[in-house]
Image: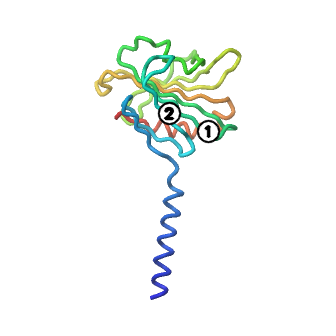
Amino acid sequence: MKKYILLLLSLVILTQSNAQKNKKSKTWTVKDIGVSYKLPVSWRSDPFSSSSVCHCPGTINDNSELDEEYLGMVVYTAEFPIIDTANRSKVWGYHFESSEDGEKITVNGIEFVKKKGLMKEGDEENEAWQYVSVDTPESNGVYIIIYFWGQHKKFAHNEDVLLEIISSVNRG
């Protein structure tokens, strides 16, 4: 009987330990913007109903607790057609610049055009990705606009994390 109890207790402890190890991300659903996505547990999310940049709802996300590997992310939404496109290419004082046409990708049924470029403010430059959803019948007339940015080598070092985040994006 003692062996059975010890075995059962060991299984419970092992199961709880594995559950903690497997909790690598948390799901964020931002009802104001109709978007959900998963972030690593070390990231924080700060939804807003309006900003000084675009007067639109969105969310700022980052891994600020990991300053040496800082990465930022912002999610905006807009109704078709986007009237203030220029404002939605900004994050704080940073402005997204890209010279490429981008590539079409589909994530969970959402069509995006992904562009690689730079987030610039004065002399400061960070590598950046921009994802802008394409108008489809499933989009219900709402764009999703997502930016990721960070220092060049840190951005490249964490590319797999960014790809995990974007692969988790859903409407709703």
Question: Split into 4 quadrants, where in the image is the C terminus?
Answer: top left
Question: Split into 4 quadrants, where in the image is the N terminus?
Answer: bottom left
The disc at residue 67 is: none
Question: Is there CB contact under 8 Å for labels 2 and 1?
Answer: no
Q: Residues within 10 Å of mark 2 (few under 14, many from 20)?
A: few
Question: Looking at numbered disc 1 in the image, what kind of residue is underneath it?
Answer: Asn
| Spot occupied by residue 86 in the image (x, y as percentages of width and height) | 50, 12
Real-space Cα distance between discs 2 and 1?
Answer: 21 Å
Q: How many marks?
A: 2
| Spot occupied by residue 126 in the image (x, y as percentages of width and height) | 65, 24
Of the residues under marks 2 and 1, which one precedes in the sequence? 2
Front residue of 30/148: it is: 30
Q: Where 24 sits versus 37, above or below?
A: below
Q: Where 103 sits versus 66, above or below?
A: above
Q: Residue at x 61, y 33 (%)?
A: 71
Front residue of 89/47: it is: 47
Circle 1: element type:
loop
Question: Looking at numbered disc 2 in the image, what kind of residue is underneath it?
Answer: Asp
| Spot occupied by residue 20 in the image (x, y as percentages of width and height) | 52, 58
Q: Where 63 sits versus 17, above or below?
A: above
Q: Residue at x 40, y 11 (%)?
A: 83
Q: Residue at x 49, y 24 (%)?
A: 103
Q: Residues within 10 Å of mark 1 (few under 14, many from 20)?
A: some
The answer to whether 93 appears left or right of 34 in the picture is right
- Looking at the picture, the colour scheme in use is rainbow
| Spot occupied by residue 39 in the image (x, y as percentages of width and height) | 50, 41
Label 2 sits on residue: 46
Circle 2: element type:
strand
Label 1 sits on residue: 158
Q: Quadrant of residue 66?
A: top right
Of the two numbered discs 2 and 1 in the rendering, the one whose residue sits closer to the viewer: 2
